[in-house]
Protein backbone atom coordinates (compact mmCIF):
# COMPACT_ATOMS: atom_id res chain seq x y z
CA UNK A 1 0.00 0.00 0.00
CA UNK A 2 1.39 3.33 -1.03
CA UNK A 3 1.39 6.20 1.46
CA UNK A 4 -1.23 8.85 0.82
CA UNK A 5 -1.69 12.56 1.48
CA UNK A 6 -4.30 12.86 4.25
CA UNK A 7 -7.05 15.43 3.99
CA UNK A 8 -6.62 18.55 6.11
CA UNK A 9 -9.75 18.00 8.18
CA UNK A 10 -10.87 21.58 7.43
CA UNK A 11 -11.13 23.70 4.30
CA UNK A 12 -8.13 25.55 2.86
CA UNK A 13 -9.79 28.84 3.80
CA UNK A 14 -10.67 27.75 7.35
CA UNK A 15 -7.53 29.13 9.01
CA UNK A 16 -7.36 32.43 7.11
CA UNK A 17 -9.00 34.39 9.91
CA UNK A 18 -6.47 32.78 12.28
CA UNK A 19 -3.40 33.91 10.34
CA UNK A 20 -2.80 31.09 7.84
CA UNK A 21 -4.09 31.95 4.38
CA UNK A 22 -5.56 29.71 1.69
CA UNK A 23 -2.45 29.99 -0.50
CA UNK A 24 -0.20 28.84 2.35
CA UNK A 25 -2.34 25.75 2.87
CA UNK A 26 -2.65 25.10 -0.86
CA UNK A 27 1.11 25.10 -1.30
CA UNK A 28 2.07 23.57 2.02
CA UNK A 29 -0.44 20.72 1.95
CA UNK A 30 -0.98 20.26 -1.78
CA UNK A 31 2.63 20.74 -2.93
CA UNK A 32 5.15 20.39 -0.08
CA UNK A 33 3.46 17.58 1.85
CA UNK A 34 2.46 15.83 -1.39
CA UNK A 35 6.09 15.97 -2.56
CA UNK A 36 7.25 14.17 0.61
CA UNK A 37 4.62 11.46 0.10
CA UNK A 38 5.55 11.02 -3.56
CA UNK A 39 9.27 10.83 -2.79
CA UNK A 40 8.71 8.36 0.07
CA UNK A 41 6.62 6.09 -2.16
CA UNK A 42 9.39 6.19 -4.77
CA UNK A 43 11.97 5.03 -2.21
CA UNK A 44 9.71 2.25 -0.90
CA UNK A 45 9.05 1.02 -4.43
CA UNK A 46 12.79 0.56 -5.03
CA UNK A 47 13.78 -0.84 -1.62
CA UNK A 48 12.35 -4.24 -0.57
CA UNK A 49 13.63 -3.70 3.00
CA UNK A 50 11.08 -0.87 3.41
CA UNK A 51 8.12 -2.63 1.87
CA UNK A 52 5.24 -3.63 4.13
CA UNK A 53 6.57 -1.43 6.95
CA UNK A 54 4.44 1.18 8.71
CA UNK A 55 5.47 4.82 8.51
CA UNK A 56 6.59 4.70 12.15
CA UNK A 57 8.71 1.60 11.52
CA UNK A 58 10.37 3.21 8.48
CA UNK A 59 11.22 6.31 10.56
CA UNK A 60 12.75 4.24 13.37
CA UNK A 61 14.62 1.94 10.96
CA UNK A 62 16.17 4.78 8.93
CA UNK A 63 16.99 7.21 11.76
CA UNK A 64 20.77 7.65 11.94
CA UNK A 65 21.30 5.35 8.95
CA UNK A 66 23.52 7.52 6.72
CA UNK A 67 22.70 5.64 3.53
CA UNK A 68 18.96 6.00 4.21
CA UNK A 69 18.95 9.72 5.00
CA UNK A 70 16.72 10.68 2.04
CA UNK A 71 14.19 8.01 3.07
CA UNK A 72 14.26 9.22 6.69
CA UNK A 73 13.82 12.86 5.67
CA UNK A 74 10.75 12.18 3.55
CA UNK A 75 9.18 9.64 5.94
CA UNK A 76 9.78 12.02 8.85
CA UNK A 77 8.28 14.92 6.97
CA UNK A 78 5.20 12.83 6.05
CA UNK A 79 4.70 11.90 9.73
CA UNK A 80 5.36 15.48 10.91
CA UNK A 81 2.88 17.03 8.48
CA UNK A 82 0.11 14.50 9.24
CA UNK A 83 0.47 15.72 12.82
CA UNK A 84 0.82 19.39 11.92
CA UNK A 85 -2.59 19.53 10.19
CA UNK A 86 -4.15 17.94 13.27
CA UNK A 87 -2.36 20.39 15.57
CA UNK A 88 -4.19 23.38 14.10
CA UNK A 89 -7.87 24.18 14.17
CA UNK A 90 -10.30 26.87 12.97
CA UNK A 91 -11.28 27.08 16.65
CA UNK A 92 -7.66 26.91 17.87
CA UNK A 93 -6.19 28.76 20.82
CA UNK A 94 -8.64 27.60 23.48
CA UNK A 95 -7.07 25.37 26.10
CA UNK A 96 -9.10 22.69 27.90
CA UNK A 97 -8.81 22.81 31.70
CA UNK A 98 -7.08 19.44 31.95
CA UNK A 99 -4.24 20.57 29.67
CA UNK A 100 -4.03 24.01 31.26
CA UNK A 101 -3.57 22.39 34.69
CA UNK A 102 -0.80 20.10 33.43
CA UNK A 103 0.96 22.94 31.59
CA UNK A 104 0.76 25.16 34.67
CA UNK A 105 2.20 22.36 36.80
CA UNK A 106 5.14 21.67 34.47
CA UNK A 107 5.94 25.13 33.04
CA UNK A 108 4.70 27.42 35.83
CA UNK A 109 2.02 29.09 33.69
CA UNK A 110 0.44 29.01 30.23
CA UNK A 111 2.37 32.18 29.35
CA UNK A 112 5.66 30.50 30.31
CA UNK A 113 4.79 27.49 28.16
CA UNK A 114 4.03 29.76 25.20
CA UNK A 115 7.34 31.60 25.73
CA UNK A 116 9.23 28.29 25.85
CA UNK A 117 7.51 26.99 22.71
CA UNK A 118 8.21 30.22 20.87
CA UNK A 119 11.84 30.24 22.02
CA UNK A 120 12.23 26.64 20.85
CA UNK A 121 10.90 27.49 17.39
CA UNK A 122 12.92 30.68 17.09
CA UNK A 123 16.04 28.86 18.34
CA UNK A 124 15.81 26.12 15.73
CA UNK A 125 18.46 27.36 13.30
CA UNK A 126 17.28 26.85 9.73
CA UNK A 127 14.49 24.41 8.94
CA UNK A 128 12.84 22.18 11.50
CA UNK A 129 10.13 21.71 14.08
CA UNK A 130 9.24 22.67 17.63
CA UNK A 131 7.31 20.22 19.79
CA UNK A 132 5.38 19.92 23.03
CA UNK A 133 6.02 16.40 24.28
CA UNK A 134 5.19 14.30 27.29
CA UNK A 135 8.54 12.87 28.37
CA UNK A 136 9.21 9.45 29.85
CA UNK A 137 9.35 11.11 33.29
CA UNK A 138 5.69 12.17 32.97
CA UNK A 139 6.56 15.85 32.52
CA UNK A 140 5.69 18.07 29.59
CA UNK A 141 8.60 19.72 27.82
CA UNK A 142 9.41 21.70 24.71
CA UNK A 143 11.91 20.25 22.28
CA UNK A 144 13.03 21.01 18.73
CA UNK A 145 14.34 18.94 15.84
CA UNK A 146 16.07 19.90 12.57
CA UNK A 147 14.73 19.26 9.08
CA UNK A 148 12.53 16.13 8.97
CA UNK A 149 13.40 14.67 12.35
CA UNK A 150 10.89 14.33 15.20
CA UNK A 151 10.46 13.02 18.77
CA UNK A 152 9.41 9.60 17.46
CA UNK A 153 12.90 9.23 15.95
CA UNK A 154 14.78 10.80 18.87
CA UNK A 155 12.72 9.01 21.52
CA UNK A 156 12.08 12.27 23.37
CA UNK A 157 8.49 11.52 24.25
CA UNK A 158 4.91 11.48 23.10
CA UNK A 159 3.97 14.42 20.88
CA UNK A 160 1.11 16.66 22.01
CA UNK A 161 1.80 19.49 19.56
CA UNK A 162 4.16 19.99 16.64
CA UNK A 163 4.74 23.21 14.75
CA UNK A 164 6.54 23.50 11.42
CA UNK A 165 9.15 26.27 11.39
CA UNK A 166 10.33 25.73 7.82
CA UNK A 167 10.00 29.03 5.97
CA UNK A 168 7.34 27.57 3.65
CA UNK A 169 4.97 27.39 6.62
CA UNK A 170 4.99 31.12 7.37
CA UNK A 171 6.56 33.16 4.59
CA UNK A 172 3.33 34.17 2.82
CA UNK A 173 1.60 35.17 6.07
CA UNK A 174 4.47 36.51 8.17
CA UNK A 175 7.35 36.98 5.70
CA UNK A 176 10.61 36.61 7.66
CA UNK A 177 8.98 37.11 11.07
CA UNK A 178 9.19 33.61 12.56
CA UNK A 179 8.62 34.91 16.13
CA UNK A 180 5.32 36.51 15.07
CA UNK A 181 4.25 33.31 13.30
CA UNK A 182 4.98 31.29 16.45
CA UNK A 183 3.23 33.75 18.75
CA UNK A 184 0.15 33.64 16.54
CA UNK A 185 0.40 29.86 16.32
CA UNK A 186 0.29 29.31 20.10
CA UNK A 187 -2.35 32.04 20.59
CA UNK A 188 -4.76 31.37 17.72
CA UNK A 189 -3.97 28.27 15.67
CA UNK A 190 -2.86 25.56 18.10
CA UNK A 191 -5.40 22.79 18.55
CA UNK A 192 -5.18 22.35 22.32
CA UNK A 193 -8.17 19.97 22.23
CA UNK A 194 -6.02 17.59 20.16
CA UNK A 195 -3.09 18.09 22.54
CA UNK A 196 -5.25 17.38 25.61
CA UNK A 197 -6.57 14.20 24.02
CA UNK A 198 -2.99 12.85 23.89
CA UNK A 199 -2.54 13.16 27.68
MN1 LIG B 1 6.21 21.92 6.05
Image (cartoon, helix red, strand yellow):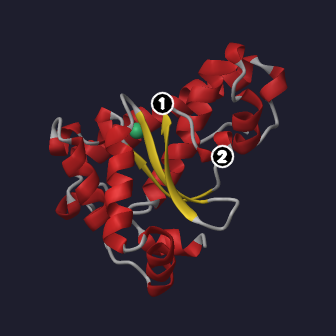
- Residue sitting at x 44%, y 60%: 87
User: Foreground residue, 192 or 39?
Assistant: 192
Quadrant, the C terminus: bottom right
Badge 2 element = helix
Q: Quadrant of ligand 1?
A: top left
Question: Can residue 141 be seen?
Answer: yes
- Residue sitting at x 57%, y 27%: 73
- Badge 2 is on which residue? 152
Q: Which percent across, then down, holds residue 168?
A: 30, 35
Question: Can residue 89 be seen?
Answer: no
- Residue sitting at x 44%, y 42%: 129
Quadrant, the N terminus: top right
Looking at the image, residue 68 lies above or below residue 125: above
User: Foreground residue, 115 or 196?
Assistant: 115
Badge 1 element = loop
Whether the residue carrying mark 1 lies under 8 Å from ligand 1 is answered with no
Whether the residue carrying mark 2 lies under 8 Å from ligand 1 is answered with no
Q: Using residue 131 as the reference point, say whether residue 14 is left or right of it.
A: left
- Badge 1 is on which residue? 147
Q: Which percent across, then down, holds residue 105?
A: 49, 77
Q: Which percent across, then down, holds residue 36?
A: 52, 31
CA–CA distance between discs 1 and 2? 14 Å
Residue at the far bottom: name it.
97
Amino acid sequence: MAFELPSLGYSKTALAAKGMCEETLELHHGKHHQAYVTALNGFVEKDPSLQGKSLEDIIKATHNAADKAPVFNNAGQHWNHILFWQCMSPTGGTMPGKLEAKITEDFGSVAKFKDAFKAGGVGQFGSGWVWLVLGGDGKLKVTKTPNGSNPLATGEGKVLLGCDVWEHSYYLDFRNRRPDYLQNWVDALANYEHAAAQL
